[in-house]
Amino acid sequence: MTPELPIRLPSLFVSHGTPMLALQDRDEDAWVAHLQDWARALPVRPRAVVVVSAHGLSAEDTVEIAGAARHSLIYDFRGFPAALYQVEYPAPGAPELLPRLLSLLSAQNFRTEVTGRGLDHGVWVPLRAAFPEADIPVIQVSLPFPTQPQKALLLGKALAPLREEGVLIVGSGSSVHNLQQMRWSGKTGQPLPWAARFSRWVLDCLREKKVAALVGFEDESPDAALAHPTTEHFYPLFVTLGASLPGDELELIHEGVEYGTIGMECLALRAPASHPAQGRVFH
């Protein structure tokens, strides 16, 4: 009998939007509904989720791993309703995964440090939407920054083997992220033209596997400086791309721009039903 091949879990990118999404349910917000439906349709239940968030940064070449058995939450924002600071997401940690993570990261020459840091909102907001039961173990892995996109790709490459070991890899950032020009009163209004153009450009590059163009986004897109005045929210996309494996196909989960300047694209790279080990990778 031919041994059964392991089921490869996807590499996921989520634009995590504003923290207010943690107070929305699936009937109130399409982003929540789409993430939840996608997670429920996974072929297997993840044994753990490893998340790289734009809000968890570390020094270049150093990766910090939140290794607690039980995480606290970091409410790393100000000026929001009091109810938001009472939100809980009591997902367990996954300390048993630490040796494997440390080995994979060291193999790519990252310095590593295990910390007791809590989960920031780039982790618990999207996970609360996708896995509201909070019963899947979570580990946050930091994003070395400032750095180059190639380093974020390398971080994703280091994590990629976990996908065939029952682990879901998540990059959490934003396809477009300009807080200075946000229109807080216009969540569902028309995006600013440059935001809409950059969002479309990113998706076009992904559909055509033009990763080199994405890596050079600051030169390749005339809208890049407005779309990302600072680049930390774009770099988790490179982690997701770096974690691609041969045969992966692009799956668009959610798209759009909210508040005029905040991209909400969520996408997955996942193996097709047939020939899962054939075809180009995304990096």
Image: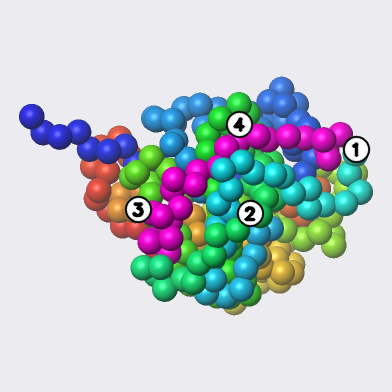
Q: Determine contact: label 1, label 3, CB under 8 Å.
A: no
Q: Indicate the amino acid at tag 2.
A: Gly
Q: Is residue 276 left or right of residue 33?
A: left
Tag 3: amino acid:
Pro
What is the distance, in whole Å, between disc 4 and disc 1 at their CAs? 22 Å
- Residue interval drawn in magenta: 83-105
In the image, 114 versus 280, the foreground residue is 114
Compare marks 2 and 3 and give the one earlier in the sequence. 2
Badge 4 crowding class, 10 Å Cα cut-off, few under 14, some 14 to 19, many 20 or more, is: some
Q: Residues within 10 Å of mark 3 (few under 14, many from 20)?
A: some
Q: Which mark is residue 69?
A: none
According to the image, what is the colour scheme of the structure? rainbow
- Residue that carries the numbered disc 3 in the rendered image: 161
Q: Which residue is mark 4?
A: 134
Instruction: Give the vertical position of 145 relative to 81 (above or below).
Output: below
Q: Earlier in the sequence, mark 1 or mark 3?
A: 1
Q: Point out residue 115 in the picture as x, y percentages from the top left corner.
A: 60, 58
Name the residue at 39% across, 54% down.
100
- Disc 1 is placed on an element classified as helix
Q: Residue at x 30, y 49 (%)?
A: 247
Residue pictured at 72% horizontal, 58% vertical: 177
Query: Which quadrant of the rendered structure holds the N terminus?
Result: top left
The residue under label 1 is 82
- Label 1 Cα crowd, 10 Å radius (few <14 / some 14-19 / many 20+): few
Q: Earlier in the sequence, mark 3 or mark 4?
A: 4
**Residue 89 part of the magenta segment:** yes
Alpha carbons under labels 3 and 4: distance apart: 24 Å
Residue 42 placed where, x, y %?
44, 31
Q: Amino acid at mark 4?
A: Ala
Percent from the top left, x then y, of residue 27?
A: 71, 22
Q: Identify the element where label 3 is drawn.
A: helix
Quadrant hosting residue 135: top right
